[in-house]
Structure formats: C-alpha cells, structure tokens
C-alpha cells in the first residue's frame, strides 16, 4: 500500500489577532474587559497585564477566534504557561492543565487543512508570583514559532460538534454502579445536568460520593473496526448499542477499581474488543460512573476517529 502526503501552502493571510477577554478572577467569571491581541506571547513577570484593572495575581484570560494554517498537515501546538492553561483547536481539546505550576509546557496535535479557518480558544489563569503565556505551533512544513497575527482572526464560527449529556446524583453511599442505579432518584431526578463537548472530564476532586450517567450518540465518519477504552475513579461501565436504540446496548468496557488519569492499561476490562461501525451511522452510547474521590476520565479510540452527536 502506498501513502502519499501532500502539503499545500496558501497565500499569506491577513489576520487580526485573537479576541482576549480579561477577568479579575481565576475562573473566567465576573466582569470582563475585551481587546484584540495580535499574538499570545506575554511575559508579565511579577507585574500585571496593565489592562482591565487586573492586578499582578489572581486573574484569567480567554482568547478566542479562528486560526488559518498555511499547510495541510498535522500540527503540533505548544502552550507554555505559568500557571494553568487549556487549549481547544477546531472545537477539540488539545491540551489542558488545571493546576498552578511554574512556567511549564504542554503539547497537542491535530490535523488541519491549508487555508481553512477553524475555531481556536485558549484559557489561561494566573494565581501568584510570575505570569506568562505563549502559544506556538509547528508541523512538517511549518517551523516552530509563536503563531503570528497574520494567521489569527478574532471572530469565531458556529461549532459543528455535538455533545454528550452528563447527569449526576450526589450523596450516594459506596462505590459500586448499583449504588447509583438502585437510587430512588435514578434515572429521572438527577441533582444536575450539563453537556460535555468531549467524552472526558478533566476536573479532579470536585466532589465525593457522586454517581454520573452520560448518554448520547456516537457517529463515526468512516467504516472501520474500532476499539474503546475507559479510565475512571472509582468504578465505571461503558455501554454501546448496535444502533440508536438504548435497549440494544452492550457492555463493552469497564473498570472495577480506580485508575490513574488516562491510564488505559490498568485493567484488561478497560479496553473493548474490536467493534465494526458504519460511517455516518448513529450509535447510542452510555457511561455509568461511581466515584468516591475524584472524577471520570474516559475516551474512545480506534483505527478511525468519530464524532459524537448530542443526545
């Protein structure tokens, strides 16, 4: 089998930079002050951004807009931050660090097409001491550099992604799935609902003695044999239907003891067997989770990537 890779360069774009929303809190809440920043390459040291009434500590910034690559290639994005940062490209989570750390780097990759603009969002928070944030990219044809203004735009496009519904029940005893499913409030009276844009929760230690139920539809973009994996603390079950009917769901992967973050090899049962899926056909997917200490980490992976549609 032959594999041919093409890289096409477009004419130099005329970008404006990214819209920056500045908050005087570390959680992107409260009054915001907005400006357009040509690039994300700031080193404020122990000082302040000098904008929006922000002090030298305890603030956050959300940059959003579009990015336009010059080449059809797999791009590596580099985020160097003191303290935390989370990056989405084309509405996909690329890197995330939700705790304070001194000037540390993160990387993530995504395939992009030359000249095609996609959404980008970078969230950054600063707690104490030094403050800096830098956003770079590189690829086979693109040298590593701070992403220039010419390739950034301050407006965004409507997301074409779906979501997964997450419901949770609080104050449950034990750590088994039956503690959730036997609860008198399950499944009709959850304590809260929210929609995730990724089948993964990165927030840790947010609650204890909680049960969660995630439901939605999976739509692969091509025919293929897929494998799925789940990681969680403390116990979790991942179910997949043969079609859109929840009654046809089958248990495909599960964990019976807590795993580490994104640890896919802790237990044999974490990884499913190969499952044949048809491209652009919807499949009902469900996850049951019981936690005593932290929260759910889950993903699906295979020879082809797919798309989740909202429940």
Image (spheres, rainbow, N blue to C red):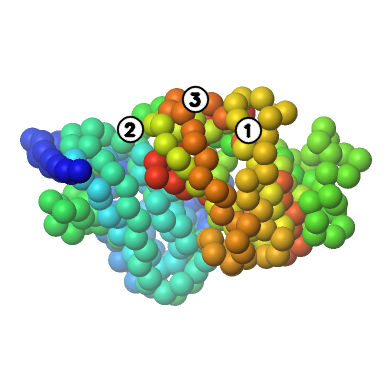
User: Who is closer to the viewer here, 41 or 225?
Assistant: 225
- Tell me the residue that label 3 is attached to: 281
Q: Quadrant of the C terminus?
A: top right
User: Who is closer to the viewer here, 211 or 47?
Assistant: 211
Image x and y of residue 134, in percent: 30, 60
Q: Is residue 34 visible?
A: no
Label at residue 155: 2
Neighbour tally class for label 1: few under 14, some 14-19, many 20 plus, Cα within 10 Å: many
Q: Is residue 155 left or right of residue 212?
A: left
Neighbour tally class for label 2: few under 14, some 14-19, many 20 plus, Cα within 10 Å: some
Residue 55 quadrant: bottom left
Earlier sequence position, callout 2 versus callout 1? 2
Neighbour tally class for label 3: few under 14, some 14-19, many 20 plus, Cα within 10 Å: some
Image x and y of residue 85, in percent: 43, 58
Spatial separation of the CA atoms under disc 1 and disc 3 = 12 Å
The residue depicted at 42 percent of the width and 36 percent of the height is 224
Earlier sequence position, callout 1 versus callout 3? 1
- Tell me the residue that label 1 is attached to: 241
User: Who is closer to the viewer here, 183 or 229?
Assistant: 229
Image x and y of residue 31, in percent: 52, 45
Q: Is residue 71 left or right of residue 41?
A: left
The single residue placed furthest to the front in the displayed view is: 1
Spatial separation of the CA atoms under disc 2 and disc 1 = 38 Å
User: Who is closer to the viewer here, 138 or 265?
Assistant: 265
Looking at the rendered image, the disc whose residue lies closer to the viewer, 2 or 3, is: 3
Q: Is residue 301 visible?
A: yes
At numbered mark 1, what does the secondary structure look like: helix, strand or loop? strand
Looking at the rendered image, the disc whose residue lies closer to the viewer, 2 or 1, is: 1
Q: Is residue 268 left or right of residue 77?
A: right
Q: Is residue 235 left or right of residue 140?
A: right
The residue depicted at 40 percent of the width and 45 percent of the height is 303
Earlier sequence position, callout 2 versus callout 3? 2
């Amino acid at each position: 089998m032959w594999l041919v890779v093409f890289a096409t360069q477009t004419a130099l774009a005329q970008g404006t930079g990214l819209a920056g929303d500045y908050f005087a809190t570390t959680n992107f809440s409260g009054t915001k002050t907005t400006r357009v920043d040509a690039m994300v390459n700031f080193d404020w040291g122990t000082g302040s951004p000098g904008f929006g009434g922000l002090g030298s500590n305890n603030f956050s910034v959300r940059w959003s807009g579009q990015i336009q690559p010059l080449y059809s290639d797999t791009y590596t994005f580099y985020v160097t931050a003191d303290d935390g940062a989370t990056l989405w490209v084309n509405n996909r989570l690329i890197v995330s660090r939700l705790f304070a750390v001194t000037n540390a780097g993160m990387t993530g990759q995504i395939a992009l097409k030359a000249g095609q603009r996609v959404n980008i969002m970078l969230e950054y928070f600063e707690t104490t001491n030094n403050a800096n944030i830098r956003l770079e990219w590189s690829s086979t044809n693109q040298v590593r550099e701070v992403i220039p203004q010419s390739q950034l735009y301050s407006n965004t496009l409507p997301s074409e992604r779906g979501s997964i519904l997450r419901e949770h029940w609080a104050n449950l005893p034990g750590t088994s799935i039956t503690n959730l499913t036997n609860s008198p409030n399950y499944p009709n009276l959850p304590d809260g609902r929210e929609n995730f844009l990724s089948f993964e929760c990165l927030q840790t230690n947010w609650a204890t003695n909680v049960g969660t139920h995630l439901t939605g539809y999976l739509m692969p973009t091509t025919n293929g044999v897929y494998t799925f994996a789940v990681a969680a603390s403390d116990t979790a079950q991942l179910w997949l239907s043969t079609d859109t009917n929840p009654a046809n769901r089958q248990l495909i992967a599960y964990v019976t003891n807590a795993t580490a973050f994104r640890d896919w090899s802790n237990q044999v049962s974490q990884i499913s067997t190969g499952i044949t899926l048809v491209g652009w056909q919807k499949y009902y997917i469900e996850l049951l989770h019981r936690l005593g200490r932290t929260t759910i980490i889950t993903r699906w992976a295979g020879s082809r990537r797919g798309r989740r549609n909202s429940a």
